[in-house]
């Protein structure tokens, strides 16, 4: 007898198996000895080196691991490549905070020493998220772990920058940018939060220079009027047709400004006239370029007013300046009105500071050529393929069509320093290294640009920089393009689109075939989880409480739909894990003699008992379903298929139907074969479950009394046996037996109905009953062949099967599919009124179901759209209900 603990300890399995898998190199593609094997590649979306595992990571990593383990078991050379992102702003913030506790600033240290501290911080903290990824059971190839600032990846970043610069796609210039006064850096449009808020709309009057009267402009930011260089109106607005070209006097500064006509102006907004501040509003900036307007900067990088704002305002905070502007306009009688107004305000996504649009010298990447590459690939070849296609393909293409140039420089010290150097004369030298720059410049007197690149610039190269680009490495040739990207919808713009553009630009191929967009795990109230709300769930705590496997099943069930976190769901999958353990424990405790059977299902299914033919059919159908579901990223469907097969088919029915033979006291060939078949179905079930539940399945599979090596494909022949390298079960069509499934369903239906009768009539568990079954000849033979199992599972002392058996009046009856009927004589036990009420309820329930189905079929739209087999299925069900109803009426009549 095999020794197996009564209770499953997930922590013990998690500790033991992962270390063994990693040490033996099972995660590396080289474990597959066939260099011609099909390839499956995923690169992990690199988590920030500053971070720790959150539920979004756990969700994506679970799905990636399910796919990777499935493909590995199917004989693919699988590479799931891990790594972390240097996260410029976040890491610099963390190190700055650390210095602050020591009474220092980054400027006290200087750039080189600060960067040293940042590397030290990275070394101390990067390990945390890597340990957490191991805890998830993620089968990533740690030998290929990457970091975005590794030497080789940095070389790729500089190569990409130089190539783009040489082609004129990267340039340096003055543009209006999103400036964070707190972080002291520029942000791209995608790093900006647009928060709706309630505020004020101020109506300010600007007097004409050479005539009486004034024009009224409406603004939410009156402090910026100090930088106005025009007022604009729509050329088609008849109210202002006569004043276009006239001059106004800008109040407070007495500067002359023109009235210009521009179609950008919406006549319906405010008064129809708008103030134009080219240095402090992106739209005004563009308008200023069109009309050759001066750019007057009145707010600086610290969000304080400049000298150009006037002596009274210089040095004031922008909000203090706002109050003073309004006060002065009011005293001059130029404040027409102030109204409540709701509008969106731009904030830094990290520190939530209100941003300031400023004109600044920055590095930019032209996006038109790169955008066209991505749009052409999508429109001509449908790549990448988004799953779900709706709405994400349109979201992606709409954004690409409206793409503006990307601000790629950041005013930080931690990150990839821009590979541009300046000579004493101000010439710009862009090169891959300082040595190359000196050679190009013909001088050693160079100063490197102090800015670093946007973190997303290096992330955009991740699918190929991690594989050795710009060198033509074997990894790059073998594993690029990758197979699928699994990601969240909020970085389709920031990351997905940029990887597609750079992949097409530098490699000539899209970086992945498919993009699977996961749903979001929300809190129990339907809110997004976040640190600021304090409503996040720590996956490590869930692992500790319920086990990794149960948590993985819960997360895989999320699929592509937003889902509220429900701990009861994790608890139910923990119960499922316990069910698997208990079922396997029963099989193992009753496995003596099984190993003596060389082939559990030798001889062909025609000679097998019904329950064996049925479970083989259900197993193979489930294998077919799950393989198809995983190939189409239907994670939720795959979990449901596996759950119902193992719990319903295997545990609730197959084990119970086989139990008498398996637990027989006397050794016999029949008992050994039944035990071997039970172990065989269990073994294949564990392989089906493994991608979702790696720890539990390995723990049990290793205990099975089987020759484990026989289940490993030839490509893994040199490896020590492990379930993660065992062949994933495929459907054998020869073992799919629809007749066996129909016949077994009739037996299950009968047993279930009799159990219901026992329950409803309060028959004591120990009381043996008599069963009378009336059935047509084909079902008679089915029930007769299974009569021993029927008797045991319904606790019947006697089972009588006949075509037209006379049912005693004092019987509880049930009508079965196919017109069969079962009766349990209840002489001396039955309450006739109670029995009539029960049958009437059943009849009412069937009538309601029939009415609902009839109404569906009466709808011509439904019949026209629904598949023909679905319509036929509904009609067959209505006919079956009618048959059952007739039989119920007869039973009710007999009980009157």
Image: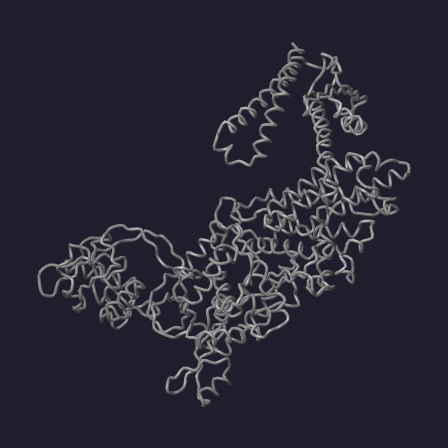
In this view, the residue farthest toward the top is 896
Q: Position of residue 759 (x, y in %)?
A: 69, 24
Query: If the image is split into quadrants, where does the C terminus sit?
Result: top right
At horizontal 83% and vertical 38% (from top left) the residue drawn is 662
- Quarter of the view holding residue 147: bottom right
Task: Identify whether 728 is placed above or below 184.
Answer: above
Q: Position of residue 365 (x, y in %)?
A: 42, 70
At horizontal 31% and vertical 68% (from top left) the residue drawn is 304
Q: Position of residue 52 (x, y in %)?
A: 57, 60
Question: Is residue 696 visible to the viewer in this orientation of the structure?
Answer: no
Question: Is residue 314 visible to the viewer in this orientation of the structure?
Answer: yes
Q: Position of residue 672 (x, y in %)?
A: 87, 41
Query: If the image is split into quadrants, where does the N terminus sit?
Result: top right
Question: Which one is nearer the viewer's eye here, 6 or 235?
Answer: 235
In-image side of 256 versus 831 (left or right) = left
- Quarter of the view holding residue 32: bottom right
In this view, the residue farthest toward the left is 211
């Amino acid at each position: 007898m095999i020794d197996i603990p009564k209770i499953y300890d997930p922590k013990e399995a998690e500790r033991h198996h992962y270390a063994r898998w990693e040490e033996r190199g099972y995660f590396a593609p080289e474990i597959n000895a066939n260099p011609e094997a099909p390839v499956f590649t995923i690169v992990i979306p690199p988590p920030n080196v500053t971070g720790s595992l959150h539920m979004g990571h756990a969700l994506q990593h679970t799905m990636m691991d399910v796919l990777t383990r499935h493909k590995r078991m199917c004989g693919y050379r699988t590479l799931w490549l891990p790594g972390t992102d240097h996260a410029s702003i976040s890491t610099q913030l963390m190190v700055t905070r650390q210095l602050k506790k020591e009474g220092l600033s980054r400027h006290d240290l200087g750039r080189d020493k600060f960067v040293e501290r940042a590397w030290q911080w990275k070394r101390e903290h990067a390990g945390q998220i890597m340990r957490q990824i191991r805890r998830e059971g993620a089968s990533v190839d740690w030998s290929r772990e990457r970091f975005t600032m590794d030497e080789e990846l940095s070389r790729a970043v500089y190569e990409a920058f130089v190539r783009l610069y040489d082609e004129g796609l990267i340039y340096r210039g003055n543009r209006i940018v999103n400036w964070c006064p707190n972080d002291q850096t520029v942000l791209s449009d995608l790093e900006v939060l647009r928060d709706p808020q309630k505020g004020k709309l101020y109506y300010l009057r600007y007097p004409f220079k050479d005539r009486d009267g004034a024009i009224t402009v409406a603004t939410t930011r009156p402090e910026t009027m100090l930088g106005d260089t025009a007022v604009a109106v729509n050329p088609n607005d008849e109210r202002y047709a006569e004043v276009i070209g006239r001059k106004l006097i800008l109040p407070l500064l007495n500067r002359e400004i023109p009235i210009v006509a521009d179609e950008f102006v919406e006549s319906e907004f405010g008064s129809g006239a708008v103030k134009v501040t080219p240095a402090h509003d992106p739209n005004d900036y563009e308008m200023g370029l069109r009309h050759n307007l001066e750019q007057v900067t009145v707010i600086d990088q610290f969000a304080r007013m400049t000298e150009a704002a006037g002596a009274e305002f210089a040095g004031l905070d922008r909000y203090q300046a706002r109050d003073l502007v309004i006060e002065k306009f009011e005293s001059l009688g130029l404040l027409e009105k102030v109204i409540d107004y709701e509008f969106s305000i731009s904030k830094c996504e990290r520190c939530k500071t209100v941003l300031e649009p400023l004109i600044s010298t920055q590095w930019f990447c032209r996006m038109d050529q790169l955008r066209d590459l991505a749009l052409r690939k999508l429109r001509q070849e449908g790549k990448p393929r988004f799953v779900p296609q709706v709405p994400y393909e349109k979201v992606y293409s709409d954004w690409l069509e409206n793409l503006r140039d990307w601000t790629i420089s950041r005013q930080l010290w931690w990150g990839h320093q821009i590979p541009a150097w300046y000579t004493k004369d101000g010439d710009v030298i862009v090169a891959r290294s300082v040595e190359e720059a000196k050679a190009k410049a013909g001088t050693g007197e160079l100063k490197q640009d102090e800015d670093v690149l946007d973190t997303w610039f290096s992330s955009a190269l991740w699918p190929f920089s991690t594989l050795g680009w710009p060198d033509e490495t074997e990894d790059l040739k073998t594993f690029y393009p990758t197979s699928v990207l699994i990601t969240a919808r909020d970085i389709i713009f920031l990351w997905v689109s940029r990887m597609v553009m750079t992949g097409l630009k530098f490699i000539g191929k899209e970086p992945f075939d498919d993009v699977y967009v996961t749903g979001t795990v929300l809190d129990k109230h339907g809110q997004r989880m976040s640190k600021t709300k304090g409503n996040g769930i720590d996956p490590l705590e869930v692992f500790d409480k319920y086990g990794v496997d149960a948590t993985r099943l819960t997360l895989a069930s999320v699929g592509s739909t937003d889902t509220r976190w429900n701990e009861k769901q994790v608890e139910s999958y923990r119960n499922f894990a316990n069910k698997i353990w208990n079922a396997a424990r029963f099989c193992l405790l009753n496995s003596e003699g099984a190993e003596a059977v060389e082939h559990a299902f030798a001889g062909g299914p025609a000679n097998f008992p019904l329950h064996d033919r049925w479970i083989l059919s259900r197993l193979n159908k489930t294998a077919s379903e799950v393989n198809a579901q995983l190939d189409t990223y239907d994670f939720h469907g795959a979990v449901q298929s596996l759950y119902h097969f193992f719990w319903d088919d295997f545990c609730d029915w197959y084990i119970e139907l086989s139990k008498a033979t398996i637990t027989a006291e006397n050794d016999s060939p029949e008992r050994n074969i039944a035990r071997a078949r039970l172990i065989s179905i269990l073994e294949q079930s564990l392989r089906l479950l493994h991608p979702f539940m790696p720890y539990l399945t390995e723990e049990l599979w290793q205990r099975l009394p089987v020759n484990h090596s026989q289940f490993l494909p030839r490509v893994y022949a040199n490896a020590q046996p492990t379930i993660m390298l065992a062949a994933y079960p495929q459907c054998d069509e020869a073992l799919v037996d629809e007749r066996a499934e129909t016949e077994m369903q009739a037996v299950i239906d009968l047993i279930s109905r009799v159990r219901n009768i026992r329950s409803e009539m309060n028959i004591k568990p120990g009381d043996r009953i008599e069963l009378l079954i009336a059935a047509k000849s084909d079902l008679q033979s089915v029930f007769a062949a299974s009569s021993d199992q029927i008797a045991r599972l319904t606790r019947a002392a006697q089972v009588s099967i006949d075509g037209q058996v006379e049912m005693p009046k004092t019987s509880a009856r049930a009508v079965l599919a196919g017109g069969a009927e079962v009766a349990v004589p209840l002489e001396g036990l039955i309450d006739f009124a109670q029995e009539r009420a029960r049958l009437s309820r059943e009849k009412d329930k069937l009538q309601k179901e029939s009415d609902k189905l009839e109404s569906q079929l009466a709808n011509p739209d439904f019949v026209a759209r629904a598949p023909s087999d679905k319509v036929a299925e509904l009609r067959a069900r209505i006919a079956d209900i009618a048959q059952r109803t007739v039989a119920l009426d007869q039973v009710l009549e007999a009980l009157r």
